Image (spheres, rainbow, N blue to C red):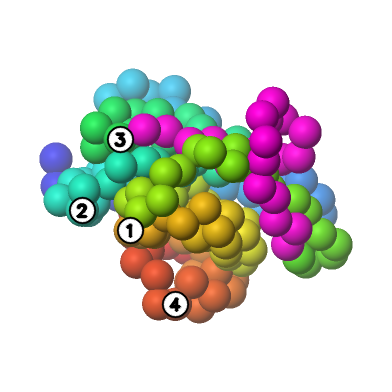
Amino acid sequence: MTTSDLETRIRAAVRDVPDFPKPGIVFKDITPVLGDASLFRQLTERMAQPFANDRVSHVVAIESRGFILGGPIAIRLAAGLVPVRKPGKLPSRRERVEYALEYGTDILEVHADALPPKSRVLVVDDVLATGGTALATLSLIRRLGAEVVGLSFIIELGFLSGPQRLSGERVESIISY
């Protein structure tokens, strides 16, 4: 299957949900993609492929849909998997970062010993929107002394500020809106 065929199949499977989670938002629902075993496998292989020769030691998966993608991508890259979670979900000593949202703030945490210094990290999530969550994750990774190889997303919402906020980072997305 060619890259454009895969992009077409993913685009056709992603479901738009208007006014979710609040009025005016059109949510890009990837669950139909995940429910198609062949498409899910091809999607995760495609997300890993650009980083196959980058000696990735760890895939950092952002809560929560990043977790679904991170496991198969980590296996494909022969890398460890590190979850980045909302507060209060990790049982051991944690590093945390508070970051700005459009209306308020949020917090992400990672185990303080999750990434050995000089680890080579790929960050994985489903959607790149404003880039705030990705930037907060990068901050955590670098605080632990790891190197960010790149970021891999299914969807990039180009009309939002995420791609610009991540300029200077290697960002790979399969489809853009």
* Residue that carries the numbered disc 1 in the rendered image: 149
Q: Is residue 25 above or below residue 46?
A: below
Mark 1 surroundings within 10 Å by alpha-carbon count, few (fewer than 14), some (14 through 19), many (20 or more) = many
Upstream in the sequence, badge 2 or badge 3?
Answer: 2
Q: CA–CA distance between discs 2 and 3?
A: 11 Å
Q: Is residue 63 above or below residue 98?
A: above
Indicate whether residue 161 is drawn in magenta: no
Residue 145 seen in render: yes
Q: Secondary structure at mark 2?
A: loop
Amino acid on which disc 4 is placed: Ser
- Image quadrant where residue 41 sits: top left
Q: What residue is pinned by disc 4?
A: 167
Q: CA distance from mark 3 to mark 4?
A: 25 Å
Where does the magenta region start and end? Answer: 80-99
Residue 96 locus on image (x, y percent): 69, 50
Q: Disc 3 marks which residue?
A: 79
